[in-house]
């Protein structure tokens, strides 16, 4: 007699791409879990919370979508046999909305799992006493809190006195086998790729400044993405005649994204705030040398001068220095590329992550 599947109400992002064409780490994390081998042991009930846009939306639109999702969730909790409720969230209203579901689910006797996945969560906690109290109340209703790295585990433990066994570190994951194809030689000029939201907090203006001041012709920036600063960046690039150095693309996904990653030599992500970005893992799996910042869970994955170069956030001069280090030493690119690939295979392959979710979802192995 076959064992009954666990029924898991999973609240997250399940679309193939957002309205602007973006494919975020949240989307990948949720969809890859649902499509993994866990589906043989889990009966997923999906509540999609993908924002219609990452740009500004009307208050009425947000409230309507939130109440619709909460009503749908409550229906499943009351009328379906749900064993576990798991929610992936960012910060702000997203956190509070998923947190409300977690609290109700706990009162109804369900196992509750929360996965905060935003680097900006730390700012909201530190700057808003009311929000911090809300987070504390929500954490008390969680059976498990998934932390993207040791930094986040320490932060949640120290700020909210959460017990050690409730805080479970699970780094982000990707299907590393999709990314191994790579050209054998470094490009000339060297191709430097940024992939993500085009806004200040991702360090986009540090990239612009680096492209402006680097007085050499042996590199080109490929900026793939969109966001609040996209149009202003486009204007400044054209106004200063930097089209030859800074190639501003829009969102890329599917084969176009794989091609850009495969052709890139260096991946740059000078973020000011992060959880643990999937784009970084994709670049490592695509055999790119990495330049990034020491924020969030990134130091769990990138070790300075071992498998990448780590700089301080909001430091365009350090970014220029890191780029020069690679451009002046092509052998260093090859060494860091090899080490980064090995790291992502050992720490972030989806096969490793599946075993961790078997435990956190309390599936019989």
Image (cartoon, helix red, strand yellow):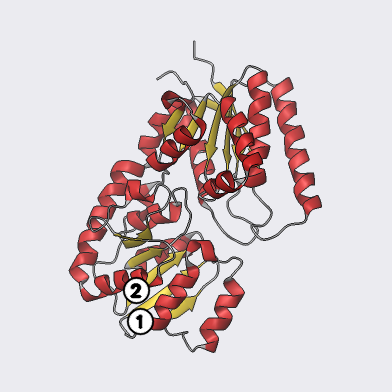
344 or 17, which is in the foreground? 344
**Residue at left 74%, top 42%?**
66
Q: Which mark is residue 214?
A: 1
Task: Classify 201 as above or below 350.
Answer: below
Local crowd at mark 1 within 10 Å, few (<14), some, or many (≥20)? some
195 or 351, which is in the foreground? 195
Local crowd at mark 2 within 10 Å, few (<14), some, or many (≥20)? some
Q: Which secondary structure, mark 2?
A: helix
Residue 63's x, y, as percent?
A: 78, 46
Q: Which mark is residue 320?
A: 2
Q: Which mark is residue 93?
A: none
Residue 325's x, y, as percent?
A: 25, 71
Left or right, 94 with reference to 178: right
As drawn, the residue found furthest toward the left would be: 331
Q: Which secondary structure, mark 1?
A: loop
**Residue at left 77%, top 39%?**
68
26 or 175, which is in the foreground? 26
As drawn, the residue found furthest toward the top would be: 1
Residue 313's x, y, as percent?
A: 42, 61
Q: Is residue 252 visible?
A: no
Residue 148's x, y, as percent?
A: 44, 41
**Residue at left 45%, top 32%?**
157
93 or 45, which is in the foreground? 93
Which image quadrant for residue 217? Answer: bottom left
Task: Classify 300 as above or below 72.
Answer: below
| CB-based contact (under 8 Å), mark 1 and mark 2 | yes
Mark 1 vs mark 2, CA separation in Å: 7 Å
Image quadrant for the C terminus? top left
- Which badge, 1 or 2, is on the more N-terminal residue? 1
């Amino acid at each position: 007699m076959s064992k009954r599947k666990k029924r898991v109400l999973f609240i997250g992002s399940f679309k193939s791409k957002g309205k602007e064409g973006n494919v975020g780490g949240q989307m990948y994390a949720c969809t890859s879990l649902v499509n993994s081998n866990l589906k043989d042991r889990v009966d997923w009930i999906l509540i999609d919370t993908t924002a219609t846009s990452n740009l500004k939306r009307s208050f009425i639109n947000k409230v309507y979508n939130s109440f619709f999702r909460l009503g749908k969730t409550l229906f499943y909790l009351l009328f379906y046999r749900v064993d576990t409720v798991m929610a992936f969230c960012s910060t702000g209203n997203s956190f509070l909305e998923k947190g409300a579901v977690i609290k109700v689910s706990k009162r109804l006797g369900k196992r509750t799992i929360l996965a905060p996945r935003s680097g900006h969560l730390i700012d909201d906690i530190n700057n808003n006493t009311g929000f911090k109290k809300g987070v504390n109340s929500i954490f008390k209703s969680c059976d498990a809190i998934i932390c993207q790295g040791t930094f986040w585990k320490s932060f949640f433990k120290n700020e909210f006195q959460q017990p050690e066994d409730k805080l479970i570190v699970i780094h982000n994951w990707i299907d590393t086998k999709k990314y191994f194809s790579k050209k054998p030689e470094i490009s000339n000029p060297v191709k430097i790729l940024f992939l993500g939201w085009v806004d200040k907090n991702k360090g986009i203006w540090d990239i612009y400044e680096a492209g402006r001041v680097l007085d050499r012709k042996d590199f080109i920036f490929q900026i793939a993405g969109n966001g609040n600063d996209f149009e202003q960046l486009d204007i400044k690039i054209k106004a200063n005649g930097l089209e030859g150095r800074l190639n501003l693309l829009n969102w890329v996904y599917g084969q176009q994204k794989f091609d850009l990653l495969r052709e890139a030599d260096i991946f740059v992500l000078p973020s000011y705030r992060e959880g643990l970005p999937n784009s970084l893992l994709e670049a490592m799996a695509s055999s790119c040398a990495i330049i990034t910042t020491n924020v969030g869970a990134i130091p769990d994955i990138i070790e300075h001068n071992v498998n990448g170069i780590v700089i301080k956030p909001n430091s365009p001069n350090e970014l220029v220095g890191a780029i020069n280090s690679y451009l002046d030493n092509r052998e260093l690119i090859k060494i860091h590329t090899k080490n980064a690939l090995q790291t992502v295979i050992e720490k972030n392959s989806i096969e490793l992550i599946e075993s961790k979710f078997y435990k956190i979802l309390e599936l019989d192995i």
